[in-house]
Image (cartoon, rainbow, N blue to C red):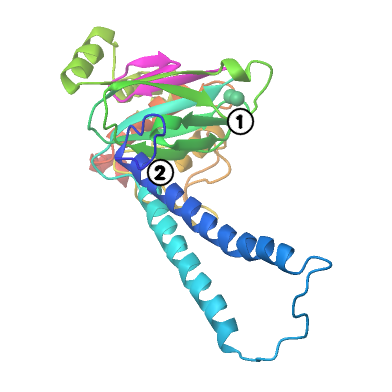
């Protein structure tokens, strides 16, 4: 899978990253030899006291220039195309992905599975299944780094980033924080454990969470009082949330937002910033009242409503 005796390339993409790295090294070595070889040769040929022809060049031609410009240009463009193709693969999660959520904080990684299982500094995964991570931080910038998967992604407070991979080997792999984030930065790490699918299923059951993410979000939705306005009585004060996720939302400002994870997060924490057209700015901010993990649960709940339709009488 990997051209190198590198430690554990544990995903298919990791192998591709290694090939690209090998390509870079080979091309760099080729040019280094091309430049340093003649340099060393001339060093001896023209050193002081040597009888060498030092008269100026007699042949003038543009052909040499074209050759040494065009060939390296094409090689570099090839490398660029190769890397860009790989980048697109890395940045676009396939649709069939299993989801997990990552919150970095000083100094630990908090992970939640869609089924509701929660872990700290450990991430259990099934072999061969595509995993999509949605990640954020609740304090400073951290960087989620799994060397065996050749994945390193900064997590930044206030925004979501995604990352995906498909574990191809059973094993336990190191997980690090790769961004200096304070005194215990070096302790901020753990393990990714890739298991046989049947072992993973058993692990999920053994963890036995009370609710999956969406159900936990629904409970929060009631506990925080969101349901009072967003589901509520005959007097509708807030937009219904059924069928909202993933679609366009007309804003009071005249713009149109897409109701993705980031938009919903912003609405919960900064409700005045992207208010839905036709509604008064009545919603209080939940900044400081909900944790990043709870926001993820709320989003999971709203996402679970994506395919539902609001009751007609509520939607006039
Ligand atoms: Cu978190 Cu370094």
Q: In the rendered image of this protein, does residue 108 appear above or below residue 257? A: above
Membership of 116 in magenta stretch: yes
Secondary-structure class at tag 2: helix
How would you rate the neighbour count of disc 2 (Cα within 10 Å): few for under 14, some for 14-19, many for 20 or more? Answer: some
Secondary structure character of the magenta stretch overall: strand
**What percent of the width, then of the height, locates residue 162?**
42, 39
Membership of 193 in magenta stretch: no
Ligand 1 under 8 Å from disc 1 Cβ: yes
Secondary-structure class at tag 1: loop
Q: Quadrant of residue 177?
A: top right
Q: Residue at x 37, y 40 (%)?
A: 14
Q: Quadrant of residue 302?
A: top left
Q: Is residue 56 left or right of residue 207?
A: right
Closest to the camera, between mark 2 and mark 1, is 2
Q: Closer to the N terminus: mark 2 or mark 1?
A: 2
Residues drawn in magenta: 107-124
Q: Find disc 1 in the rendering and name its residue.
A: 179
Ligand 1 under 8 Å from disc 2 Cβ: no
Residue 300 visible somewhere in the drawing: yes
Real-space Cα separation, disc 2 to disc 1, in angstroms: 22 Å
Residue 245 visible somewhere in the drawing: no
**What percent of the width, then of the height, locates residue 198?**
16, 18
How would you rate the neighbour count of disc 1 (Cα within 10 Å): few for under 14, some for 14-19, many for 20 or more? Answer: some
**Quadrant of the picture in which ligand 1 is shown:** top right
Q: Residue at x 56, y 88 (%)?
A: 63
Q: Which mark is residue 18?
A: 2
Question: In terms of depth relative to the viewer, which is nearer, 246 or 271?
Answer: 246
**What percent of the width, then of the height, locates residue 250?**
44, 54
Q: In the rendered image of this protein, does residue 287 appear above or below residue 162? A: above
Outermost residue to the left: 198
**What percent of the width, then of the height, locates residue 89?**
35, 50
Tell me the quarter of the image containing the N terminus. Answer: top left
């Amino acid at each position: 899978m990997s051209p190198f005796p590198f430690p554990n390339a544990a995903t298919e993409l990791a192998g591709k990253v290694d090939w690209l790295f090998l390509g870079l090294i080979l091309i760099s070595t080729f040019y280094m030899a091309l430049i340093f070889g003649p340099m060393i040769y001339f060093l001896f040929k023209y050193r002081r006291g040597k009888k060498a022809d030092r008269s100026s060049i007699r042949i003038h031609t543009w052909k040499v220039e074209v050759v040494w410009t065009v060939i390296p240009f094409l090689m570099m463009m090839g490398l660029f195309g190769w890397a860009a193709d790989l980048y697109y693969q890395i940045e676009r999660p396939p649709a069939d992905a299993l989801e997990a959520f990552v919150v970095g904080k000083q100094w630990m990684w908090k992970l939640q599975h869609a089924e509701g299982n929660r872990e700290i500094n450990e991430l259990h995964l099934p072999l061969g299944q595509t995993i999509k991570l949605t990640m954020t931080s609740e304090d400073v910038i951290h960087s989620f780094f799994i060397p065996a998967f050749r994945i390193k992604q900064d997590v930044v407070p206030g925004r979501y980033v995604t990352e995906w991979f498909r574990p191809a080997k059973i094993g336990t792999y190191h997980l690090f924080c790769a961004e200096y984030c304070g005194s215990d930065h070096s302790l901020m790490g753990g393990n990714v454990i890739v298991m046989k699918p049947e072992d993973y299923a058993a692990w999920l059951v053994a963890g036995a969470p009370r609710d999956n993410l969406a159900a936990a979000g629904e409970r929060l939705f009631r506990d925080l009082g969101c349901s009072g306005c967003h589901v509520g009585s005959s007097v509708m004060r807030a937009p219904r949330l059924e069928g909202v996720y993933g679609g366009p939302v007309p804003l009071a400002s005249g713009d149109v937002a897409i109701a993705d994870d980031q938009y919903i997060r912003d609405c919960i924490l900064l409700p005045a910033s992207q208010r839905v057209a036709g509604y008064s700015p009545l919603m209080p901010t939940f900044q400081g009242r909900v944790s990043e993990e709870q926001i993820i649960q709320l989003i999971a709940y709203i996402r679970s409503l994506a395919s539902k339709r609001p009751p007609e009488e509520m939607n006039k």
